[in-house]
Image: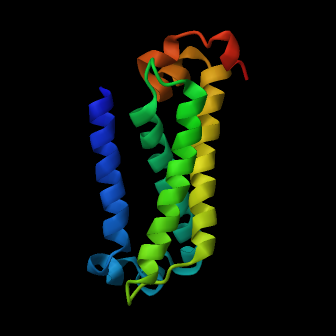
Amino acid sequence: MSLRGWRILLICWMAMIFLISSHLLANTASFDSTGLLFGSINYVARKMAHVAEYAILAYLWFRSLWSRREGFRRAVFWSLVLSVLYAVTDEFHQSMVPERLGVWTDVLFDAAGALLACALLVYSRYHAAGGLRLILLGPLGDTVPTEGETA
């Protein structure tokens, strides 16, 4: 997929996060409504959803930024930073929605997801076998890291 395609996916994912945080889906995304679905593991399920949501966001940021001109480590760094900044703005947005709460601890779970994705990217670049590297990094993953890129 081209950088343009990754960027379209990124924008769609960010829009989905915004929509989930908005007034439109407040009733279906509330703690009480998910409690009916998840029961006693509701809290854990909700926090793991934060981790997964922002791991995907960081990955999409990475694939949208990394090119032959953009260094691998720089793309990973900005993927993490931009994902965490989006988490902060998402919680701020939720604090303005009457049916939702903006909770700063959710930013920690979001950041953990983004960090997990970035760690997996670094692992796949420098330590993983060709198959995992190719799946996560695409065609550029087949290139040998330069001397300045060693782990």
| Vertical placement of residue 141 versus 61, above or below | above
Of 49 and 74, the residue lying toward us: 74
> Which color scheme is applied?
rainbow
Residue 108 in view here: yes
Judged from this view, the residue extending furthest toward the front is 69
Question: Which residue does the image show at 59% across and 39% down from the upper left?
Answer: 77
Question: Which residue does the image show at 57% across and 46% down from the upper left?
Answer: 80
Judged from this view, the residue extending furthest toward the bottom is 98
Q: Position of residue 24 (x, y in %)?
A: 26, 78
| Vertical placement of residue 42 versus 107, above or below | below
Q: Position of residue 107 (x, y in %)?
A: 58, 66
Residue 49 in view here: no
| Vertical placement of residue 79 versus 42, above or below | above
Of 96 and 25, the residue lying toward us: 96
Name the side, left or right, on which 27 lies relative to 79. Answer: left
Q: Position of residue 62 (x, y in %)?
A: 47, 36
| Vertical placement of residue 100 versus 111, above or below | below
Q: Position of residue 13 (x, y in %)?
A: 34, 52
User: The N terminus lies in which quarter of the figure?
Assistant: top left
Snapshot quadrant of residue 103: bottom right
Question: Which residue does the image show at 46% across and 17% down from the upper left?
Answer: 140
Snapshot quadrant of residue 30: bottom left
Question: Which residue does the image show at 46% across and 67% down from the upper left?
Answer: 89
| Image mark count | 0
